[in-house]
């Protein structure tokens, strides 16, 4: 990898728009050839604006049969994510819509305001069988626009009314704005919340995930969940070799100090357009370290930038993977933290009537 320092696109994770070539779409840069435009300017370029389009799908629950994840259904209230995590494996989904997995993914967002209504309709179907629904598996349910739309809160309200179990994964302390609902759900064993902590260094976090909550805020949010008695999990992910792995033990130790119930780690994944975006990010922020990072990534992925195969994509292999695994297990042992064992209760489910209304009696 050429070791050169490119100017950064401040406040964003991606440094350009990756070309969605998988679908034969025309080559282009996000937001009007942004880098070419910046090159013509004197001084600081204008900030990239975030736009939100409301969309109205016919269904809101996505079902899957993947052997690599512990859930078979999920809800994504938003498409795209303003947190701007450069490593986000969900970025390629924007390419399906002729949008860049790069800057478009974090600046051109979609909200689904009918989510709660659609969820009620799904629950009302006679053949629907309750099992916990995962939120935050693709894009963050508590990204900044949740403060305006409150779609995630509306979904949680439906889950509470129908006594349907739900899990949440987020990088935001905004989850605490729904502490009232989460507390009630927890009383019925209907919720578990995971907060992802990538690093303890706020400057590094600002480069990796520029619009996500600072690491200290995420740790504080975990502590508040523990205090409120809400089942919780610290996800130390992704582990980026030679970039974030040095913080692994520190994050686990902090989680142990505040009484977090469980912790886990996920290695860096670079599917499709994420790989070139991440390489570009390395060239901008860590040009002297880029080759080392990618060499380790390939070593745990069978010689490839990414392993897309079922059964192995979530399980890195090789010497480096074994080292990370051993370090993490030892850190958890020292911190007194176990693995996640959340058994949410689906037996309390109250099916709404046709049309989504709950029974009065």
Image (spheres, helix red, strand yellow):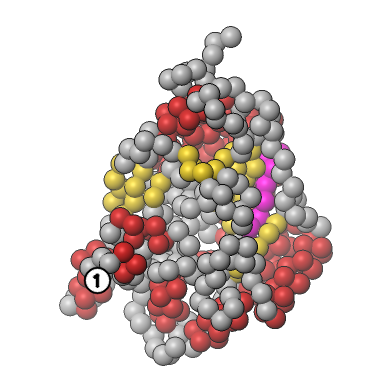
Residue at 79% in and 68% down: 330
Q: In the rendered image, which quarter contains the C terminus? A: top right
Residue at 53% in and 34% down: 156
Question: Would you name the residue on which mark 1 appears?
Answer: 27
Judge whether residue 11 can be spotted in this image: no
The answer to if 234 sits in the magenta stretch is yes
Mark 1 surroundings: few (<14), some (14-19) or many (≥20) residues within 10 A: few
Residue at 60% in and 43% down: 167
**Residue 293 picture location, percent across and down:** 54, 81
Q: Is residue 138 left or right of residue 36?
A: right
Q: In the rendered image, which quarter contains the N terminus? A: bottom left
Task: Provide the secondary structure element on which disc 1 rests.
Answer: loop
Query: What is the number of callouts on the image?
Result: 1
Q: Compare residues 149 and 206 and report the one nearer the observer.
A: 149
Q: Compare residues 238 and 272 and report the one nearer the observer.
A: 272
Q: Which of the 4 quarters of the picture holds residue 45?
A: bottom left
**Residue 259 picture location, percent across and down:** 75, 51
Judge whether residue 352 can be spotted in this image: yes
**Residue 327 picture location, percent across and down:** 74, 72
Magenta region: which residues? 227-236
Q: Is residue 45 left or right of residue 6?
A: left
Q: Which of the 4 quarters of the picture holds residue 321?
A: bottom right
Vertical placement of residue 317 versus 4, above or below: above
Residue at 52% in and 39% down: 177
The answer to if 288 sits in the magenta stretch is no
Q: Residue furthest top?
A: 361
């Amino acid at each position: 990898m050429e070791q050169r320092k490119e100017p950064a696109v401040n406040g964003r994770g991606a440094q350009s728009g990756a070309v969605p070539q998988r679908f034969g779409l025309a080559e282009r840069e996000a937001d009007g050839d942004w880098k070419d435009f910046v090159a013509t300017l004197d001084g600081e370029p204008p900030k990239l604006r975030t736009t939100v389009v409301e969309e109205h799908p016919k269904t809101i629950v996505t079902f899957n049969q993947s052997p690599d994840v512990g859930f078979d259904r999920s809800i994504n209230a938003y498409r795209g994510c303003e947190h701007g995590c450069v490593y986000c494996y969900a970025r390629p989904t924007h390419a399906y819509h002729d949008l860049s997995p790069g800057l478009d993914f974090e600046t051109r967002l979609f909200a689904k305001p009918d989510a709660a209504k659609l969820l009620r309709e799904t629950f009302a179907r006679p053949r629907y069988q309750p099992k916990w629904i995962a939120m935050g598996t693709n894009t963050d349910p508590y990204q900044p626009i949740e403060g305006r739309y409150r779609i995630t809160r509306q979904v949680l309200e439906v889950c509470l009314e129908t006594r349907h179990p739900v899990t949440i994964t987020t990088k935001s302390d905004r989850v605490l704005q729904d502490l009232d609902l989460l507390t009630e759900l927890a009383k019925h064993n209907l919720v578990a919340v995971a907060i992802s902590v990538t690093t303890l260094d706020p400057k590094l976090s600002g480069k990796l995930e520029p619009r996500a909550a600072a690491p200290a805020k995420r740790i504080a949010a975990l502590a508040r969940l523990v205090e409120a008695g809400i089942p919780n999990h610290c996800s130390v992910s992704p582990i980026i070799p030679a970039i974030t792995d040095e913080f692994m033990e520190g994050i686990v130790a902090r989680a142990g100090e505040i009484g977090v119930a469980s912790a886990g780690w996920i290695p860096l994944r670079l599917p499709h357009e994420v790989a070139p975006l991440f390489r570009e990010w390395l060239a901008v922020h860590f040009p002297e370290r880029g080759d080392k990072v990618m060499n380790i990534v390939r070593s745990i992925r069978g010689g490839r930038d990414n392993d897309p195969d079922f059964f192995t994509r979530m399980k890195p292999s090789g010497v480096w993977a074994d080292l990370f695994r051993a370090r993490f297990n030892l850190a958890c042992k020292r911190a007194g933290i176990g693995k996640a064992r959340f058994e949410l209760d689906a037996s309390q489910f109250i099916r709404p009537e046709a049309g989504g209304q709950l029974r009065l009696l």
